[in-house]
Amino acid sequence: MVYVDSDGDCDNLAAALAEALLGTLPRPQVVSLPETQLYVARNDDFDPVDRAEFPGGFKFFRCVIEVTSGEAPTSLDAQVQAVSALLEYCWAKGMPAVAACEYEDRLPHGGGYNSSAVPWPKKP
């Protein structure tokens, strides 16, 4: 899972990710990459105050992205590459993003958790 705190809605985030990652948008909130699918949804636990708490507030970011394999089985390397690109894109756009997965240690800034080098929401 990747948690992203986007100012816009999650549909707009999905469209932006599809364009930036050279994927397609076969359905709203579904980004299809060569070996990976990204399911972008509104986080039911979104909280405008709790999201600013560092480092655990990521669980309250506006959008959550489920990363799954595409049509064919996905290699771990392909999934790491896709999630790394997703995180780097979000951070470059000033969007807080944190990955919560078994391979965080292979991602830039450890997936963003507990890293002061990645953007974070301001306290209200």
Image (cartoon, helix red, strand yellow):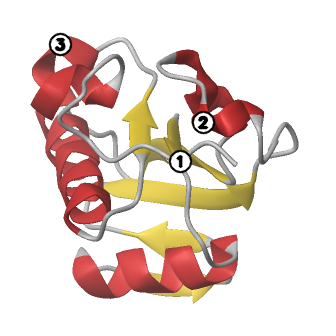
* Residue at mark 3: 105
* Residue at mark 2: 52
Q: Are marks 1 and 3 in contact (CB under 8 Å)?
A: no
Residue 9 visible to the viewer: yes
Between 100 and 91, the residue placed more toward the observer is 91
Q: Are marks 1 and 2 in contact (CB under 8 Å)?
A: yes
Badge 1 amino acid: Lys
Query: What residue is shown at x 25% (from left), y 39% (from top)?
Result: 79
Q: Earlier in the sequence, mark 1 or mark 3?
A: 3
Which residue is the extreme one toward the right? 44
* Residue at mark 1: 122
Q: Pointer 3: residues within 10 angstroms few (<14), some, or many (20+)?
A: few
In which image quadrant can residue 29 be found?
Answer: bottom right
> Dot 3 lies on which element?
helix
Q: Earlier in the sequence, mark 3 or mark 2?
A: 2
Residue 93: % across, % down: 28, 71
Residue 28: % across, % down: 68, 82
Badge 2 amino acid: Ala
